[in-house]
Image (cartoon, coloured by chain):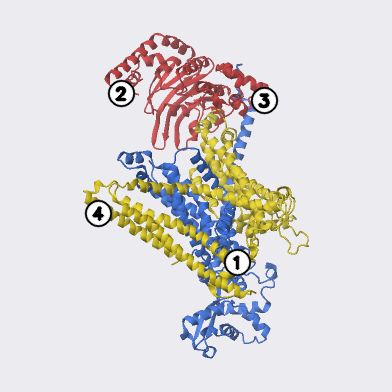
Amino acid sequence: MPQTPVSFWDTPKFKRGLAKRRAAEWRFKLYGLIAMLIGLASVALLFVSITLNGVGAFWQTQIKLDIFFDPAEFSEENLQAANYGKLVKNTLYSHFPEVTKRKEKRQLSRIVSVGADIMVQKMVMAEPSLIGTTKSIWLPVDDVFDMLHKIDFGRDSSKGGSGLVSENQLKWFDSLVANGLIDSRFNRTYFTAGDSREPELAGLLGALMGSFYTILVTLLISFPVGAAAACYLEEFAPRNRFTDFIEININNLAAVPSVVFGLLGLAVFINFFGLPRSVPLVGGLVLSLMTLPTIIIAGRAALHAVPPSIREGALALGASKTQTVIQEVVPLAMPGMLTGTIIGIARALGETAPLLMIGMVAFIVDIPSGPLDPSTALPVQIFLWVDSPERAFVEKTSGAILILLAFLITMNIVAVWLRQKFERRW
Amino acid sequence: MNAWILIVVVLALSSLLYYVAKRRSLTIARSVGGIHRLHSAPRYYGIVAALLFAVPALVVLGLWISIDEGIIFRLVLAEYFPELDRESQVDIDWLTSQILIFAQTGRLGNVENAELLQLAAARYQHLTSLSQTLRNASVLALGSIAGFVFVLAISEKLRARPIAEGIIRGLMVFSSLIAIFTTVGIVLSVLFEAINFFQIVPVADFLFGLEWSPQIAIREDQVGSSGLFGSIPLFVGTILIAGVAMAVAVPVGLLSAIYLAEYASARIRSFAKPTLEILAGVPTVVYGFFAALVVAPYFADIGARIGLNIAHESALAAGVVMGIMIIPFVSSLTDDVMTAVPQSIREASLACGATHSETVKRVVFPAALPGIIGALLLAVSRAIGETMIVLMAAGLAARLTANPLESVTTVTVQIVTLLVGDQEFDNPKTLAAFALGLTLFVATLLLNVTALYIVRKYSEQYE
Amino acid sequence: MKTGLGVSDTLQEADNKEHIRTRIDKTLLADNQANVQNSAAQIRMTAKDVNVHYADNHAIKDVSLSIYANEVLSIIGPSGCGKSTFLRCLNRINDIIDDCKIRGEIKLDGKDIYSADMDVVELRARVGMVFQKPNPFPKSVYDNVAYGPRLHSMVSNREETDEVVYSCLRQVGLLAEVEKRIHKSGTELSGGQQQRLCIARALAVKPDVILMDEPCSALDPIATAKIEDLIDELRTQYSIVIVTHSMQQAARVSQRTAYFNLGDLVEMGDTGQIFTNPQHQLTEDYITGRFG
C-alpha cells in the first residue's frame, strides 16, 4: 500500500464530502421529523375536527313556552286524542299578536320542532293533573333554527343557507332570543330516543342498545371459543401438518377484509340457516367469527408466556395434562387472554361493513329489547347519519363518533391497565 | 317457553345434575370405604354429568333454532301456495313476510288472496308452537337421558376424570376447527354464488369488460336491460385509491418509524408512538366521516381556488384518508423489522465512519427490506379490502380513469351497494357482489400469504 | 476444560497456568521486547484521566495510557473490568449509548477526539474497529469491503474499488478462499472467514489505529491462530489495540499489556514484564489464575 505523504483525511476532497454528508444527515433527520409531525398532525386534525363538530350534539336549542292546558281542549276519556299541536302553536302565536295571516302563522309555527306535540302529549298522559294549569315547558326548536342559533348557519345566503329560513322567521326567532325564550340546554333526547328523520328528535339509544346486544353475542361466543382454541393449539395439539394448517388459516383469517365476513354472514346465517335479517344475533355471530383470530392469537401468546416450569411442577405432582392446563396455566394466562379479548371486542364495536350486509342498516325508530329485535348499531348509525342531508346531522354524527371513541378509549385503557397490573416477568 | 328461557333451564338443570352426581359419588364412596376408593375426585362425576346434560341439549337446540323456521315456511307454502314458482325468491320472501306480519300483529297488508293468507298464517302459528313444544321436549329429553344414565352408572370404578377430560378436549378441538369452518364457509358461500353468477355472465366478460352498470332496467326492451358486469373499472378504481393511500402511508409511515426508532429521544418516542398508534384503533367509519365531511370538501375548495376541478367524491380524498389510516400499520411493522436488525451491524457501519443516516440507508434499511416489503404487502391488502372510507367518500359511478381528482368506485363499494337493500339470489345484480367478493378474497389471500411467508422467512434470518 | 471435579482440578489448572508462564518466558517475550524498543518513539493516541459513567455505574476510573505507532497493545482483565468500555471510547462508538458519560481527554495525533472540531466520522474512519462477534453486513463479500471506501469517496470508479477490495482481502488472506464467491453474501462464510472479512472491511478505510474487541472469542482455535498471525503482520502498518480475555493471546500477539480491574488501570508495561514479573498483587493473582 502506498504511503501518502498527506493523509486522505486532510484532503479538501474528503472535507468537502464530509460537509455534504453532514448536510444529508441533517436533511434525512428533518424528513423523519416532518413525517412524524404529519402523522401527529393527522391525529390532532381528526380529533379536533370531530370534537369541534360534535360537542354541539349534546346541547339542543330549546324554546320556553308557557302552555295553558285549557280544560276545554281535553275530553276525560281520551287524553291521547287532544290537539296538543294546537296548544303549542297557540302559545307561540301569543308572543306575536301581529302575526295574523295564515301563511305567516304556518311559517311561525315551524320554529318549534314537529315532535313538540308528542312531547307535550306524553307529559300530560303521565301527569293528567296538569290540565287547567299553566306550565313553562322547554321544547326543542326545529333543527334549522338549532343550527341558526348554534353556528349561525343559514342566516345569510353567503353561508349557503339561503332558503332554509325566511326573513320573517329570522325576525321572529331573533326577537324570541332577545326575550330570553331561546336557550341551549342539555339534549336528553339524544340519549333516550331512537333514530328519527328530524335531527332534533334523533337519539342514539336504539343504536347503543343494538351495539350492546351485538357485542354481547360476540363476547359470549368469541371469548369461550377463542380461549378454548388457544388452549388446544398451544397446549395440546400435536405439531403436525394439520395443526400447521389451522395456524396458517387463523393468521390469514385475521387479515381477510371485513366485507368478506359480511358476505359469509349473508350467505350462511341468513340465506342458508334462515336467521332473520337486521338482528344483533346475526351481527354478533359474524363479528365473533371476525374477532376469533385476534383472540386466539393473543390467547396463544399469553399461554406461551407462562414458563414451562409451572407445567412441569404441576405434572410432577401427579396432575393430568388437562388438570395442569386448566387449573394452573390458564389462570396465569388469563390477564393476557382478557387483554386480547378486549382489544378484539373494541375492534368489533367499531366494525361497520359486515353489519351493513346483514341488514343492520335499516331506519329503525324502536329501541331493540333483545338480540332478536331488528336494530342498528352505533357505527352503522354514524354511517346512516352521514348520508342525511340536514346540516344538523353533521353535529349528531360527530357526537355519536365522540361516544363511540369514548367507549373504545375506555376499553383500551382497561386493556392496558389489565396488562400492566397483572403482567409478570418470569 | 321461548329459547332464552330454555337455555336458562338447561343450564339450571345441568348445575343441579352436577350436585346430584357429586353427592351420589360421595355416597358410593362412603359405602365402599372412603373417597380414596373412587377412581376420580367427586367433582369429576359432577362435571361429566353436567356436561353430558348441557352439551347435547344445547347442540340440538342450536340446530333446531337455525333450521326450524325455514322448514315450517316451506311446509306452509307447499300446502297453501303449491303453484308458487320455486325459483322466484322475491315472491317467497314477500309471502313469508306477509304471513309473519299477520301471525304477529293480526294486520293484513294490501293483498289479494287474504283468506288464503290467513289460513296459512294460522297454519304457521300452529306449526311453530308444535315445533317449539317438540323442541323443548327433545332438548330436555336428550339431555336428561344422557345425564341421568351417567348418574345411575356412577360406581367407584367409573373413570370419570378421563371422560370429563375427553369431553373438554373434544370441545377444545371443536373450537379450533371453527377457524377452518369459517374459511370453508367463506370459500363455499362466495364460490357458490359466484358460480351461479358466471353461469349468467361469462367469466371473461366479468374479468375483462370495460363497463360496469349493474342496474338492470325494469322493462326488458330498455337499453342495458341485461346489465353490464365488466369489472375492470372497479379494479382500476380500487388500485387508484389504494395507490393514493400507499403514496401517503409509505413515506410518512417509513420515515416516521425511522425517526422514532433512530433519532427521537426517549421522551418524544414515548409520546409519539402511542399517539400514532391511536390511528390504528379508530374505527373505519370515523375515517369515512372525516374523509367525506372534512377532507373532501377541503380538497374541492383548494381545487376550485387554484383552478383544478376536484370532484367532491374524488379518489384523492378517500385515498389520502385511507393512507392516514394505514400510517400506524406501516410504521409499527417497519419499527418491528428494523429493530430486529442486530445492533452489532449498526455498530460495524458506524465504526467504518458512516453517519447515522448512511447506516440506516445503506445497512439497516436494506437488511430490513424483505420484512418491510412484507409489511407493505399487508398494508396493500388492507387498503384494497377497506370498505367504509370508500363507501362514504368515494363515488358510485364506475369510471375508467387514472386521474385521482375524479370520482371512482371500488370493488368493496360495489359489494356493499349491491347487497344493501333487497337481495334476489336469482338476479345477476345480487350475485355479482359474490363474484366481486371472490375476487377480493383471492386477491387479499394471495397478498397475505406472500406477506406472511416473507415476514416469517425474514424473521428467521437473525435467530 | 472440565469443571466441578474439585481440588485436584483446580490444582491442575494452576499447574497449566504455570506451564504457560514458563513457555511465555522462553519463546515469545524476548522477541516482542525487541520490537517495543524500536517503535516506542511515535505516540499515536493518548488517554488522560478518562472516566466513564453508565447511569450510576462508574465504569472507568482515571485511566491514562498511550498507544504507540506500529505496536500491538493488549488490554486484559476479568469480565466487567471496563476493558471493552475503554476501547469503545477510543473511537467514540460509545456515543450511541444514551446514558454513557465520558470525562477526560483522548487525543489522536495530538487532537482531542471529543473536541467540537473533531468530526466523529473522520475519527471513526481513522480508528477502525473489529468486534467480538463477526458482524458482516448482509451484503456480498465485495460490498462489505467496499463499504467504507465508497462512503468516504476514497474510490471513484470500479477499477479503484476492485483494487482496494482485492488488496484488502489478500492482506487478510481471504482472497484465495472467497474469490469465487466474492459476490455472494458475506454472512454465508464460516465464522473465522467472517471475522477476517470484518478486518478487511476495517482495513479498507486505511485507518491509523485498529481497535479489536475480543476478536477471537467466537472462533475455533485454527481460525484464532490465523487471526493472530494476521494481527502480527498488520502491526507493520497500524497501531492495534486488542481487548482479550485470553492471556495466552495477549502474550502471543502484543508488545505491551494493560491490566484493568474494576475500572482501574492497575498495571501497564511490556508484555514480557507483565507476565513474568507483575508489579501489582492483583495482576499477579489474575495472571496466575487465582481469579478472573
Q: Looking at the image, which residue is at 59% across and 34% down?
A: B366
Question: Label 2 sits on what residue type?
Answer: Gly
Which residue is disc 2 drawn over? C4
Does residue C94 appear anywhere in the picture? yes
Question: Label 3 sits on what residue type?
Answer: Ser
Mark 4 falls on what kind of element?
A: helix
Q: Looking at the image, which residue is at 58% across and 41% down?
A: B449
Question: Label 1 sits on what residue type?
Answer: Phe
Q: Position of residue A367 (x, y in %)?
A: 51, 69
Asked if badge 4 and badge 3 are on a common chain, one would say no
What is the total number of numbered labels drawn onto the structure image? 4
What's the mark number on residue B27? 4
Which residue lies most toward the bottom here?
A72
User: Which colour is chain C painted?
Assistant: red
Q: Nearer the viewer, residue C214 or B452?
A: B452
Task: For marks 4 and 1, give the CA distance.
Answer: 69 Å
Q: Position of residue A256 (x, y in %)?
A: 57, 48
Q: Nearer the viewer, residue A230 or B387?
A: A230
Q: Residues within 10 Å of mark 4 (few under 14, many from 20)?
A: some
Q: Quadrant of residue C197?
A: top right
Judge from the rendering whether residue C189 lies leftward or rightward of residue A301; answer left or right: right
Mark 1 falls on what kind of element?
A: helix
Task: For marks 4 and 2, give the CA distance.
Answer: 58 Å
Q: Position of residue A324 (x, y in %)?
A: 35, 44
User: Which colour is chain A painted?
Assistant: blue
Which residue is disc 3 drawn over? C156
Judge from the rendering whether residue B146 lies leftward or rightward of residue B398; answer left or right: left
Which residue is disc 1 drawn over? A393
